[in-house]
Image (cartoon, helix red, strand yellow):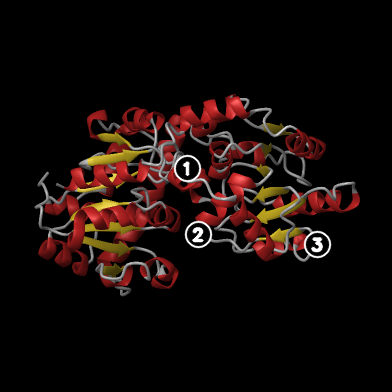
Amino acid sequence: MTRASTTNPVWLVLPDPLSTRIFFDCGIVERLRARLGDRLHVVFLMPRADVAGWSDRLAGVPVTYREELFPARAGVWRRVDRWLDRRIGFYPLALRVSLRHGFHRERMRPGHRNTFLDPTKAGPLPRWDWIEKLMLRWHYGTLRYLPRTLTERLRRERPAIVMSNIQMQVDVPLIVAAKRLGLPLVGYIASWDHTVGKGVIWPGMARYLVQNDVMRDDLERYHGIGLERVVVTGWPQTDVFKRRRPRADYDALLETFGLDPARPVVLVMGNTPTNAPFEPRFVERLVGWWLTGPNEHFQFLFRPHPRDSAWRQRFAVASGQAGAYVQSPSYTDIDDLALLLQHGACVVSNAGTILLDSLVNDRPAVCVLYDEGAPPGETWAINNVGGEHYRQLVESEAFYRAWSFDEVTSAIERALAHPAELAAERARVTRELVGEVDGLAADRVADAIVAGVA
């Protein structure tokens, strides 16, 4: 693969909100700007209206938006490409990787709202190894449709390309075009679960950046990527958590929520409607228990998932209650999250990265493993922690498990009474899954990117 010139631009491609938040709020963009100078060029592959909070922070950095590279008009060849992609491309390949290795087996069901969990999207062809190899060759091959505006820009500028998340459907044209033109690619694996259930990973990049040793080994085992091209950087979000924030800042934040800084706060962290369809019933029962019992000594703060567009309805019962507050979902308030996790009394959640965030911040955590009010046979909550990436976490004793509502409430009371009870196990699991929390992960990411594009 052609190496980048030390004067050619470096395109930092940001295709989704979660990885964009990491790159901005953990300081990676700032460090790349310092290291690359005027070579840095940011490319947003999200709708322009969704990136204003980030693009406003890029004064002096060239910015390209999705519509500039991917025109809306669709010709015949583009429509054919989309038709084929639905049958042998992005989601069919993603499902086949998961089915082959057993990723999320318990969560899969026909018609699932999360396409990665709908086995009917695996495509019409037989699940034979040689067929799937041909599908992969087509997916990243010379027959794919590419917008002329994209290829002309790449041919003219010949940038090195850095992707904050290499497993997005919108990434594929950029990967294919860079492959055809011999441009170097550096890929960041966006989260700890993305190697085992979030689709195929193209094995032709110059360098891959991962958070921990488990992810590095996953790239070799499941995606055929040599370890010599993988750099373990640590988890950049822990840099934000590493910096201790004064209790006074936490108290001030609570006051803006109408909460009493003198009373403990239990943080209830939401999941997505797709993963936790019965969450509103859980919130309703939790608030009811809190209002009718002798629980005046603590308060609730509800934090819906950033992708929960129905949060007002799903958390309505908690809104307006004295001693409770429902935050607006956000991708850009990571500093507030750090404050809450450093000083909040206890975290209640089902699954997701927030559970690991809690342990990194040494917060007592309650993992809800049942579905409040669900019909018999519905097992969303336990299935959400059934993925391969959760194995080490679930096998630990770093948090309280709640298989019923009574176990939720007793775990909350225990966590409030004995906050240090599981501290040693929280620290051990953090070391295994995150690595050293030294505040330098963003520097390692930036250094690995610069080395990868030069």
Distance, label 3 to label 2, CA atoms, is: 26 Å
| Of pointers 3 and 2, the one earlier in the residue sequence | 3
Q: Is residue 184 visible?
A: yes
Depth check: 123 or 303 in front?
Answer: 303
| Of pointers 3 and 1, the one earlier in the residue sequence | 1
Query: What amino acid type is highlighted by mark number 2?
Result: Tyr
- Is label 2 in a helix, a strand or a loop? loop
Q: Depth-wise, is mark 2 or mark 1 nearer the camera? A: 1
User: In this view, which residue lies farthest toward the bottom?
Assistant: 73
Query: What amino acid type is highlighted by mark number 3?
Result: Ala
Which quarter of the picture shows residue 95? top left
Residue 375 location, x and y as percent?
A: 77, 44
- What residue is pinned by disc 1? 242
Q: Residues within 10 Å of mark 2 (few under 14, many from 20)?
A: some
- What residue is pinned by disc 2? 331
Q: Residue at x 82, y 48 (%)?
A: 297
Q: Depth-wise, is mark 3 or mark 2 nearer the camera? A: 3
Q: Residues within 10 Å of mark 1 (few under 14, many from 20)?
A: some
Q: Residue at x 79, y 54 (%)?
A: 284
| Of pointers 2 and 1, the one earlier in the residue sequence | 1
Which quarter of the picture shows residue 227? top left
Distance, label 3 to label 1, CA atoms, is: 32 Å
Where residue 394 is drawn, which disc sits there?
Answer: none
Residue 78 location, x and y as percent?
A: 28, 65
- What residue is pinned by disc 3? 322
Q: Residue at x 65, y 62 (%)?
A: 311
Query: What amino acid type is highlighted by mark number 1?
Result: Lys
Residue 220 location, x and y as percent?
A: 31, 29
